[in-house]
Image (tube, grey):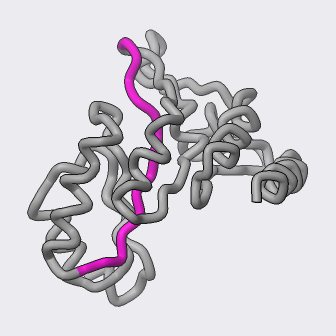
Amino acid sequence: MAAKYVDVLQIPAFLCRQTDLLVAAALTGKYVNIKKGQFLSAESMKFAVDKVRESGNPNIMLTERGTFLGYQDLVVDFRGIPEMQKNNVPVIMDITHSLQQPNQTSGVTGGKPELIGTIAKAAIAVGADGIFLETHPNPAKAKSDGANMLHLDHFEKLMTDLIKIRRAIL
């Protein structure tokens, strides 16, 4: 039903191995953005890509969003970006979600927004095809994910820095 109204269908990380969902998304003909599950290796995303391709849809993107390290933190293994690019699809780096700290003792997901620039610059340096990040004029008042958001006042400088890095690489 959503395909009539959107350009990209995103498969959440926890559902990236659900064959029926991947096939249904593929059959719309829309771009299918599959977020890598925190519990998967970059190499294993080949199987999700294959499910969409075998359904006749070549419009696929993969998104890196960190891997669980213990119970309360995520870590980004930047080797996964070129590994997932071996599937001949664009790979996007989800910067802010990779800085989440789930399952905190407070019961509320935490985050490390001070590392947004570090993760973004590293992703561009290793050749990510795009970035995703959440921003807000007042992250503390955001309805969701405020703990790992970029304050809107810092967005322009970050984008300027990333463009400089990308130009230096090319």
| Quadrant in which residue 61 is drawn | bottom left
The residue most toward the bottom is 4
Q: Nearer the viewer, residue 2 or 52?
A: 52
| Rendering coords of residue 110 (x, y %) | 55, 24
| Rendering coords of residue 111 (x, y %) | 59, 26
Quadrant that contains the C terminus: bottom right
Q: Nearer the viewer, residue 103 or 56?
A: 56
Q: Is residue 138 magenta?
A: no
Q: Would you say 164 lies left or right of 37 here? A: right
| Quadrant in which residue 20 is drawn | bottom left
Q: Would you say 40 lies left or right of 100 here? A: left
Above or below, comparing residue 71 to residue 75 in the picture: above
Q: Which residues are magenta?
A: 57-70
| Rendering coords of residue 50 (x, y %) | 19, 63
Residue 155 visible in the snapshot: no
Q: Would you say 24 lies left or right of 37 here? A: left
Q: Would you say 60 lies left or right of 108 here? A: left
Above or below, comparing residue 138 to residue 163 in the picture: above
Residue at (60%, 41%) from the top-left corner?
96
Above or below, comparing residue 13 to residue 60 in the picture: above
The residue most toward the left is 20
Residue at (34%, 70%) from the top-left corner?
32
